[in-house]
Image: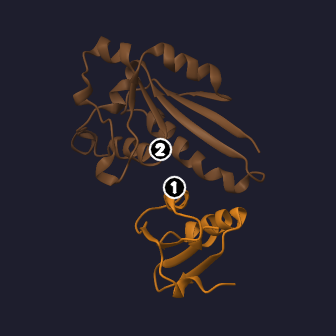
Amino acid sequence: MADLKSQTPAQVLDVLGRVCPYPLVLTKKALEKLPSGGILKILCDAPASAEDSVPRFAEGKGYPIEVVKLAESWEIYIQKT
Amino acid sequence: MATKKLLFVVRALPYKTEASRLALTHAIASQSVEIYLKDGDLVEASIAFIGDGVMNCLKNQQAMKHYGITSIEGHMKNTLLLDMKVMICKEDLDKFGIKEDALLMDAEDIGGETNAQIVPFSEIQKEMESVDHLLFC
């Protein structure tokens, strides 16, 4: 699997403070606009979104994803393919 | 691959009932269910405000001041932020004497790119006939 977090993201989406389903639906919207191959970095502190819905969505689309757990939030890297 | 179209028709006043708030939150939540559906299946939700429901679209609501609860405006803006189709019935606005400048028509302040639309009821009726599920609130 590609090391997504070491690459420069094309866009950073800050959904800190937003709860489910906003992190997912805003991620979907951001990915729609991202050029193919681009990496989206998502800053999220909603556990259900970071650990379930966003990874489930990316996997359903076949997009590579990396989820990095920080102290009280997550960094999620998704590459649009 | 199929798209299920939903239309939430909001007829309730914004406060002293949860109907319109629930319509908006369900419409927003519906945009995340595709992760649990079969490959490629989608859900597309629209919202129409008719009758007393057009009051939900007013700007500068003072819900916290009068009722001690958060305003419907945040939910309205979020629907526009998520590019949902939001229709407001022109005839009902005219009936109440509400002008467009009194309405929350966009969510530019939170990055929204879609505007609400003031449309004749005939257009809302067409939408009602075209969707798979119609939900009156």
Q: Position of residue A4 (x, y in %)?
A: 58, 82
Who's brown, chain-wise?
B
How far apart are the two marked residues, 2 and 1, measured between alpha carbons? 9 Å
Above or below — where is B77 with respect to A69? above
Amino acid under disc 1: Lys
Q: Residue at x 31, y 48 (%)?
A: B108
Along the line of sight, the residue nearer the viewer: A37 or B131: A37
Mark on residue A29?
1
Q: Quadrant of residue A15?
A: bottom left
Task: Write the residue at 30% across / 36% down.
Answer: B104
Element type at mark 2: loop
Q: Which of the 4 image quarters holds residue B106?
A: top left
Q: Position of residue B103 (x, y in %)?
A: 28, 31
| Chain letter tied to orange | A
Whether the residues at callouts 2 and 1 have beta carbons within 8 Å, the answer is: yes
Amino acid residing under circle 2: Asp
Write down the residue under mark 2: B83
Residue B124, position as x, y percentages in the image? 51, 20
* B114 displayed left or right of B129: left
Q: Sort mark 2 into few (<14), some (14-19) or many (20+) by Cα contacts within 10 Å.
A: some
Per the image, label 1 sits on a secondary structure element best described as helix
Residue drawn at the location 59% of the way across and 71% of the way down: A37
